[in-house]
Image (cartoon, grey):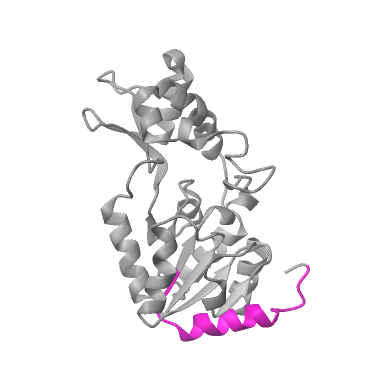
Amino acid sequence: MEGRVGPDADVAALAQLVRGAAPVVALTGAGISVPSGIPDFRSPGSGMWENVNPMEVAHIDAWRADPARFWSFYAERFQTLGDKRPNGAHQALAELERRGLLSAVITQNIDMLHRKAGTQTLVEVHGSIASSSCLSCGARFSLDDVVELLRGADGGLPACDCGQPLKPDVVLFGEYLPPEPLGRAMRYASDAGLLLCVGSSLEVFPVAQLPGVTLANGGAVAIVTQGPTAWDDRAAVKLSGDVEDELQALAAAL
């Protein structure tokens, strides 16, 4: 890789961990998608909530009270996210899975980029923009259908054939995580010989407890993210460089 003569000591240590641990499970957060042009949530000057109160636009109560206002915020996000492409970090994880070195990816992201990169065993604990549903009749609409509805919607509100407003199949503020993906994530974390945490501040619960689940069951935790996390002092390895560079270097070292 340009800029690297070879894997540095920390990447080499992480590669050794991956070789010796089974199964290896990745946990990814917003930071893995920043190189794809998707802002994270809290970075000063660029975070998604920098100039917006999420409790006013991205809370389930906001959707219920004023779905048109809710969609006025989400419409542009949906249309732009659909065009984003996986970056080298997503591709590195998909490659490790193809090579039998990674068993699953648990992601907090809703952006579909792990799917686009080719990850097969994927747990999207916060849902995905891939679809939206009608909570009245249960009908489900694909992202392409929702984008078309947004383009032609009266007042910018995509509605079901039954006339009720659609809700994206993502976990909004004020909602519990769906029990099925959360349960799968817990099982993967419990069984992991190594939980590789990538691009996550590990602050949002209940996902932030997954490193503790792995450690409590005898596994190790490695962290690849910029900035501190609450689990740094218990991580076997912590890499703080660019996520693309670090994960591509890891793949090369393996």
* Of residues 56 and 241, the one drawn nearer to the viewer in this rendering: 56
Q: Residue at x 64, y 68 (%)?
A: 246
**Residue 71 % position (x, y):** 45, 26
Does the magenta segment cover residue 12? yes
* Of residues 49 and 1, the one drawn nearer to the viewer in this rendering: 49
* Of residues 82 and 126, the one drawn nearer to the viewer in this rendering: 126
**Residue 207 % position (x, y):** 41, 59
**Residue 188 % position (x, y):** 35, 69
**Residue 216 % position (x, y):** 37, 78
Q: Quadrant of residue 12?
A: bottom right
Q: How many numbered marks does the figure carry?
A: 0
Q: Residue at x 41, y 35 (%)?
A: 59
* Of residues 83 and 60, the one drawn nearer to the viewer in this rendering: 60
Residue lying farthest to the top in this orientation: 154
Q: Which residues are magenta?
A: 3-25
41 horizontally vs 212: left or right:
right
Q: Is residue 152 visible?
A: yes
Q: Quadrant of the N terminus?
A: bottom right
Q: Quadrant of residue 11?
A: bottom right
Is 203 situated above or below 196? Answer: above
Q: Quadrant of residue 145?
A: top left
Q: Quadrant of the C terminus?
A: bottom right
Q: Is residue 254 visible?
A: no
Q: Residue at x 47, y 50 (%)?
A: 109
Does the magenta segment cover residue 249? no
177 horizontally vs 47: left or right:
left
